[in-house]
């Protein structure tokens, strides 16, 4: 085995995939449960999809379950999505199902990548591209090591027909848009309204309703949707997160079909 052949194999195949991801149908910021589920259904539907995740590992808040107890709770509708992915669930009591957080997130990662979505870790979304028509048309990316090391290094950009903000509680892409071009989101205030305290049932219901195109070319999914539209958090029940990811993919497919 030759060291340089190993190095060339890694560099060449990675760069080929990264170059292919420079023009995609949908670019997703964040590889938590909502971003991964959205990417899975988009890739399954034949759409060129890339996910950019800041951290070394994928999964966002899912592996931690509730307060580091690595279990997640699902309601009936959420359980159905895990059935589609082939993740085992157990009935806890009527209307409540439990799943292993690690089995769930590892399966979401594996199925999403095998469906054809390109997933890149250690890359942070630091800005958006807005050109003619005042529509979001791409993402500005940098290696996460750059901001972590406080280095002054310019980013690179990719083009996307649609962007999904699946960055969780911080709703980072939406914050960037508001910071750069003012409070022009399709929310009550035009800005990021802000997440409300915990109320599991209301939070689970509203997260799917809040999964919308919040600005031309920008869909919001998962906890970012709750934060942007001002809905309550829901804690370690994850059905809404999965349903929001699926809803984001359906919305994106509808918009892409219209051209
Ligand atoms: O936080 P996260 O898991 O978001 P989610 O899919 O799911 C939320 C639940 O995990 C949980 C919950 C359940 O009730 O509330 O929190 O909505 O995943 C978001 C991912 O986005 C990454 C971040 O590292 C995490 O893995 N992320 C955040 N900002 C950026 C980013 C960014 N600017 N660029 C790239 N990745």
Image (tube, helix red, strand yellow):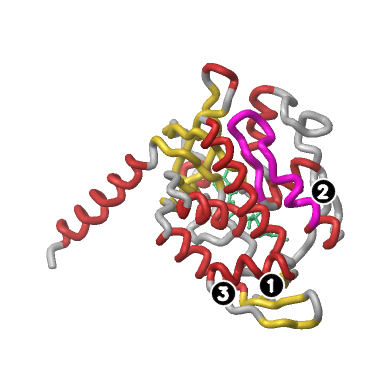
Sequence-first tag of 2 and 3? 3
Q: CA distance from mark 2 to mark 3?
A: 28 Å
Q: Residues within 10 Å of mark 2 (few under 14, many from 20)?
A: many
Mark 1 CB in 8 Å range of ligand 1?
A: no
- Image quadrant of residue 79? bottom right
Q: Residues within 10 Å of mark 3 (few under 14, many from 20)?
A: some
Where does the magenta region start and end? 205-221
160 sits to left or right of 96: left
Q: Residue at the spot x=32%, y=40% of the render?
A: 19
Q: Position of residue 249 (x, y in %)?
A: 58, 48
* Labels 1, 3: front one: 3
Residue ID for mark 2: 231
Q: Residue at the spot x=82%, y=44% of the render?
A: 230
Q: Is residue 209 above or below residue 235?
A: above
Q: Position of residue 122 (x, y in %)?
A: 46, 51
Q: Is residue 246 above or below residue 236?
A: above
8 sits to left or right of 131: left
Q: Secondary structure at mark 2?
A: loop
Q: Residue at the spot x=65%, y=68% of the render?
A: 80
Q: Secondary structure at mark 3?
A: loop
The residue most toward the front is 258
């Amino acid at each position: 085995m030759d060291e340089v052949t190993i190095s060339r194999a890694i560099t060449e195949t990675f760069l080929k995939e990264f170059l292919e991801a420079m023009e995609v149908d949908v670019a997703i910021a964040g590889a938590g449960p909502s971003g991964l589920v959205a990417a899975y259904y988009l890739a399954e539907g034949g759409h060129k999809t890339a996910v950019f995740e800041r951290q070394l590992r994928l999964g966002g808040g899912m592996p931690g379950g509730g307060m580091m107890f690595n279990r997640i709770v699902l309601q009936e509708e959420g359980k159905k999505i895990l059935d589609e992915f082939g993740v085992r669930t157990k009935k806890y009591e009527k209307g409540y199902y439990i799943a292993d957080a690690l089995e769930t997130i590892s399966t979401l990662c594996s199925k999403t990548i095998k469906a054809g979505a390109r997933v890149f870790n250690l890359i942070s979304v630091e800005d958006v591209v807005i050109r003619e028509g005042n529509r979001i048309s791409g993402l500005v990316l940098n290696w996460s090591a750059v901001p972590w090391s406080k280095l002054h290094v310019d980013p690179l950009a990719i083009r996307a027909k649609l962007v999904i903000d699946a960055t969780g509680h911080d709703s980072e892409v939406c914050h960037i848009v508001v910071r750069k071009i003012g409070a022009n989101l399709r929310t009550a205030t035009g800005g990021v309204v802000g997440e409300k305290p915990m109320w599991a049932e209301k939070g689970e219901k509203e997260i799917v309703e809040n999964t919308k195109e919040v600005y031309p070319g920008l869909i919001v999914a998962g906890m970012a949707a709750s934060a942007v539209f001002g809905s309550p958090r829901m804690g370690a029940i994850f059905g809404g997160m999965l349903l929001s990811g699926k809803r984001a993919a359906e919305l994106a497919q509808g918009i892409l079909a219209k051209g």
